[in-house]
Structures are given as C-alpha cells and as structure tokens.
C-alpha cells in the first residue's frame, strides 16, 4: 500500500477518534414555559480554532447545510481548552425539536460564493464533529404568537395565534379576570400555507422553508365600548394560553392614543443568513412601558411595513411574533405591507416606471406569510398570479376615537383608476369630520424624504401625481411613511411647498408628512446632497425638513377633538425628542358637540360661532405664551443633549 494512502488512512482514523471523544450537550431536553435559557456545552475538542461553531437546527432531519443559524465557540471564555459553554435565550416553538451540531471550519475553506446578507462567508457544514440530543417543547400544541387587531365591527376584537396542528381551538373571553360568569366562547377559523405557495428562493427552498404551523383566527363580539376584557385561547385537550386582557374599541371616546413606527424587524440571538434587528427589542420595551402607564385607556399599535424582515427565512416570523407578543396580545397591532413582505420578480403589478423599484426584497414570500399571519379590517386583496393564496391586508381604514386612520399599499397599484385609488378617494370623501376631525394616512414607501433614496424617485413622483391631490383635497392631517430608516418631520406641504413653518398650528390646508422608519432596521444611505451647498455641511437639512435624525425610536399620537399631538420618542432614553401639535379648529360647545371655528378669524382670536370675552382671551393668551416659551426652552435643552447618548443607525456617512 503506498505510503501516502497509509498516511491518509491514519489521519482519517485519528480524526474519527478525536470526533468520537468530543461531546456536545444541550439542556434542558424539554422546554417548559418557565425555561428562559438553553445551555450548550462541549468538551474534548482537540486543537480548537476560532472559527469552530455550533449550528442550530430544526427539525433535526435538516441537512448540515440547512441550519437556522450558528454560534462561534469563541463566544465562551474557555474555548481554547477544547471545552466551553454557550447560552441561548429560549428559542421560538417551530413545531419541531431543536438539535445542535458542532463543526470545524478551517479558514482555508472560506468561500465568498456562499455569503450572508452582508457579504460575509457562511459556514458550509462539512466537518461535523459532534451532535447534541434533541431539545423539544414540553407542550408543543400550546397556542403561541398571540396578537390582536381591530375588526370590521366597532364592538369586535380579533385575536390570532399559532398552533402545531389544525385541531379545534376556541377563544374564551369575558369582563372578569377569572373565567366564569359573563365569559363567552367563540370558535376559530384556521389557515396555513405550503412550500409550493412561496414564489421564489429562499422562501421556497430547503434553506428558507420551515413548517409555519396553523394560524387560528377568532373574533370576540358584543364588546361594550372602552371596557377591559380578559381572554385566553386554546382547548381543553391541547392546552390553553395565558390569560391576556385588552381595552375594547370606543369610537365615541374623546381621546385617541396610538404608537406608530415602521421598519422594526426582529432580534435573533444567533448569526444567520440575513441581518437582523437587535434594536427592535428596545422599541418593544419602551412601547410596553408606555402602554402599561396608560392603565385602562385604550390604544393601538401601527407598524407601517417591513414587519419582520424575514426575507424568505420562515422561522424569523416565529421570532418576530414571540417578540411582539407582550404588547400585541394586549393591544391591537396593525400593519401595512412593505417591500420586504412582498417584492418578488414576477409580482403582478410592475409598471414601466417601476422596473428598477420592485425587486426581490421579499425573499420569495410574495406577501403570503404576511397575508395569513395578519388579518386587518376590510377585504382588500390581489391575486398572486401563481396559484398561491391572494395577497391581503393591502388597504383599509377605521375610526379610533377622534381620528380616522387610513392604510395603503405602496407595493400594489395605487394610481388613478385602480381599486386602491378608488377605495382611498371614496373613504376620504365620507369621513365625518365632526366626529373624527383628524385623518392620519399611512403607507410604507414615502411620498417625501430628504434621504438619498434615488431608486424610489419615480415611485415618489407617481405618489405625488396620483395621491397627494387626494390628501390635500380631503384635508388629511398627517401622512406617515416608513422605508427610510430614519425619523424626519416635514412642514405641512403640497407640491414641495411649505404652507406653515411652525410646530404648533391650526390645520393649514395640507398634511404634515413624517418618515417614521426608525423602529429597528439599522442600515440607511446618506442624506440627499444639495447642489446649492457644495461645501460643508455636505448634506444640509432643507428648509421643508423641520426635524430629522438617524436615531431609533417610535412615535406616540395623542388626540382630542381640539388637538392632535405627535411625539417622537428615542429608544436611547425613552424621552420625547420632537413634537408637533395640530389644532382642528373645533371647540367643545355647551351641548357636548364640537363646533367649527372659522379659520379666517383664528388670527384675530374671534370666532364666528363662539364669543369669548376679550379679558379671558388676554389671560389665555398670556398663559399660552408662557407655555410655549417654557416648551421652547425645554426643547432647545433637549436638542443639545450629547449625541453620544443616542444609539445611531449604521449608514454610509459613518
């Protein structure tokens, strides 16, 4: 036998012996609801290297190449000894056990043909050394990923959740914390989708596809307005969720509270194929704080596109819904579709001007997970064109207290003559401004931005041409957008012209546009250059942009019939860092109904409908001047806080 062959055989036997001596364990073997951490331990690894890693798999039948993610062993302080320990936060229930596998990854085998979203080489799964036992869920059939939303009826609340099988599940709810008298039970609908329904890779490939489970949809009816209800979901045979609570919708309320943002994404506690959004945890944390502080006041949450950033990797959706459950199981959670839920090469509507705009951002999902996992009011949909379920939750509206909210899809046809355009026009025409004096319009891709989003220029032109006239004609108060991962507030504007430069004013005849895509996604191109500023600063803020920044956060809306206030809250400290106040021009009358003040008389303080003594006006004016002065002083101080206190996004400028 040739000497070289003998040496190779000997090396192979030595490697096999070393592998046999290496152990890998994962505990606990059964995950109970109270278990918050999975511990991974290994020992006996010869000649450890900094690129050795543990791959995470579910189901255990997955090939070595089809991991969910991975952790480098050098995350353990003792890795150089060939033994160590890593911990993972409790992972989501993927309706199958987890398994962990230890691999060697020699640096010479780096390949830039197999890379992650940021261009970093991905492990190839060739040199497996050890495999752990399975880690399964103690009660795999329990309901999971519970979240609420408004329904079509004002006395209804929808709850959706996921289970590992499609067996019968119900919703039980009532006004008392403990189940008993006054509680009702309603059946649920159940839906799912299959790998064949995905439109492109990675969503339809073995790498990206995982069983999504079964999505249950229950409708709680006959709710009294503005009252706290308790509920749970599940069944006696398969188990019940925790008991959650919510405040029912009250369209007659004289106050509206909402938390609004876009582009939040998902925290995932391991390396994977795509960039995930660690900062999304902070956004959820601060919103939860604010919701808890409301007590029994109703509120809802608005997430305007780019929801989980799963990009075709199915299990990221499971992480996302687990992440938002603390807020979404107790507060209605509303969404609109973004490019990362929908875009795919063969999407049905791609006009000539959008050839370079709609691409592959959806990772082959073509809106299907978004359409099945959420159910918003209304019944808007478009066919996928490939036999998959229709894409839904595109455009809809509802009243909440004193505000009328409208959601649109920037990913599907919105030009004049389309179903969506006709819906928006008819919806805005019938708004009762005496009941809801404010209108908030929301969509994903912005109509206005000073970010250098050159790719979307033609899209913005179409929105300005087709939609802005509707917003102006029907006196929309606010237009909120995502997509650009920054916060930016514009003046009230039409056709790029400011109609008011203040931050506190009576509605001036055009909506205030805001970009609120700072919920968690951390990549953002630079600000738009200005030809009239060739020197420093290179990217100055245009006059129409009243406030802009690259910090993470969210907005909080509080409205009464008289005034709508929108506040920008930073994740770095949970405090307000920008604010705009818009007055409706309505004042409460003695009979409790609002009366409209003649806008042309507001400058003199005289109303054609309401007479106020001059002396009273002087007192009120003095008080208002003091308040404005105090606010301005405080705001300037806040603006001067050290930039180091912020958690900035990653961008090309830095």
Image (cartoon, rainbow, N blue to C red):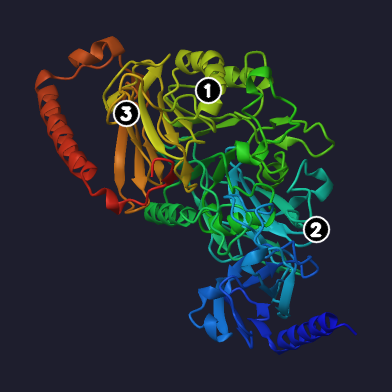
Instruction: Where is residue 211? Give x, y as percent.
Output: 77, 57
Q: Image height check: is 92 above or below 381? A: below
Dot 1 or dot 2: first in sequence order is: 2
Query: Dot 2, how many residues are within 10 Å of its Cα: few (below 14), some (14-19), or many (20+)?
Result: some
C-alpha span from label 3 to label 2: 54 Å
Which of the two marks, 3 or 2, is nearer to us in this view? 3
Task: Tell me if 585 is positioned left or right of 168 in this view.
Answer: left
How many labels were placed on the picture? Answer: 3
Toward which corner of the image does residue 534 lie, by quadrant?
top left
The residue tagged 3 is: 541
The residue tagged 2 is: 166
Residue 266 marker: none
**x 74%, y 52%: residue:** 188
Task: Tell me if 615 is positioned left or right of 590 in this view.
Answer: left
- For mark 2, give the secondary structure: loop
The residue tagged 1 is: 457
Residue 570 visible at all: yes
C-alpha span from label 1 to label 2: 45 Å
Toward which corner of the image does residue 507 lie, by quadrant?
top left
Query: Dot 1, how many residues are within 10 Å of its Cα: few (below 14), some (14-19), or many (20+)?
Result: some
Dot 3 or dot 2: first in sequence order is: 2
Which of the two marks, 1 or 2, is nearer to us in this view? 1
- For mark 3, give the secondary structure: loop
**x 40%, y 54%: residue:** 286
Query: Dot 3, how many residues are within 10 Å of its Cα: few (below 14), some (14-19), or many (20+)?
Result: some
- For mark 1, give the secondary structure: helix
């Amino acid at each position: 036998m040739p000497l070289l062959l003998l040496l190779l055989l000997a090396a192979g036997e030595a490697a096999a012996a070393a592998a046999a001596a290496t152990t890998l364990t994962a505990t606990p073997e059964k995950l109970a609801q109270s278990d918050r951490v999975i511990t991974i331990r290994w020992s006996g690894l010869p000649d450890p290297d900094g690129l050795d890693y543990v791959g995470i798999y579910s189901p255990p039948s997955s090939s070595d190449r089809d991991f969910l993610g991975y952790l480098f062993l050098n995350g353990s302080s003792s890795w150089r000894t060939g033994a160590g320990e890593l911990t993972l936060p409790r992972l989501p229930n993927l309706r199958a056990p987890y398994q962990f596998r230890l691999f060697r990854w020699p640096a010479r085998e780096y390949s830039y043909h197999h890379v992650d979203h940021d261009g970093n080489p991905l492990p190839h799964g060739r040199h497996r050394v050890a495999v752990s036992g399975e880690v399964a869920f103690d009660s795999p059939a329990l309901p999971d990923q519970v979240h609420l939303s408004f329904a079509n009826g004002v006395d209804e609340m929808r709850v959706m959740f996921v289970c590992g099988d499609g067996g019968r599940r119900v919703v039980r709810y009532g006004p008392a914390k403990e189940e008993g008298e006054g509680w009702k039970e309603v059946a649920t609908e159940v839906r799912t989708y299959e790998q064949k329904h995905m439109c492109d890779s990675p969503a339809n490939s073995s790498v990206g596809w995982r069983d999504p489970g079964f999505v249950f949809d229950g409708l709680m009816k006959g709710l009294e307005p503005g009252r706290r209800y308790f509920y749970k979901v599940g069944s006696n045979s398969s188990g019940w969720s925790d008991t959650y609570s919510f405040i029912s919708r009250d369209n007659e309320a004289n106050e509206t509270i909402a938390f609004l943002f876009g582009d939040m994404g998902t925290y995932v506690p391991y390396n994977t194929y795509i960039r995930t959004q660690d900062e999304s945890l902070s956004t959820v944390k601060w919103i939860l704080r604010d919701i808890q502080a409301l007590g029994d006041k109703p509120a809802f949450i608005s997430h305007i596109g780019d929801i989980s950033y799963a990009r075709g990797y199915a299990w990221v959706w499971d992480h996302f819904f687990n992440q938002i459950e603390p807020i979404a199981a107790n507060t209605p959670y509303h969404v609109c579709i973004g490019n990362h839920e929908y875009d795919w090469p063969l999407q049905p509507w791609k006009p000539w001007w959008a050839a370079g705009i709609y691409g592959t951002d959806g990772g082959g999902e073509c809106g299907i997970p978004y359409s099945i996992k959420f159910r918003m009011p209304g019944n808007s949909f478009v066919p996928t064109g490939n036999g998959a379920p229709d894409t839904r939750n595109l455009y809809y509206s509802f009243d909440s207290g004193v505000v009328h909210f409208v959601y649109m899809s920037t990913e599907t046809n919105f030009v004049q003559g389309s179903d969506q355009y006709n819906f928006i026009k008819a919806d805005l025409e019938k708004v009762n401004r005496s009941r809801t004096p404010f209108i908030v319009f929301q969509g994903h891709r912005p109509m206005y931005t000073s970010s250098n989003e050159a790719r979307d220029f033609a899209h913005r032109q179409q929105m300005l041409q087709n939609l802005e006239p509707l917003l102006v004609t029907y006196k929309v108060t606010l237009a909120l957008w995502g997509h650009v991962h920054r916060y930016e507030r514009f003046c009230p504007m039409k056709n790029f012209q400011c109609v008011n430069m203040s931050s506190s004013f009576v509605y001036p005849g055009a909506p205030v546009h805001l970009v609120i895509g700072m919920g968690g996604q951390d990549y953002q191109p630079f600000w738009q250059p200005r030809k009239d500023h060739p020197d420093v600063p290179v990217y100055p803020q245009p006059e129409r942009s009243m406030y802009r920044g690259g910090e993470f956060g969210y907005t909080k809306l509080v409205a009464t019939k008289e005034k709508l206030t929108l506040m920008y809250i930073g994740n770095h400290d949970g405090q307000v860092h920008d604010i705009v106040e818009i007055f409706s021009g309505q004042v409460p009358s003695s009979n409790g109904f609002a009366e409209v003040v003649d806008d042309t008389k507001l400058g003199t303080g005289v109303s054609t409908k309401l007479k106020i003594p001059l002396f009273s006006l002087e007192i009120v004016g003095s008080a208002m001047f003091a308040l404005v002065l105090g606010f301005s002083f405080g705001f300037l101080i806040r603006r001067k806080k050290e930039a180091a206190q912020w958690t900035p996004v990653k961008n090309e400028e830095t």
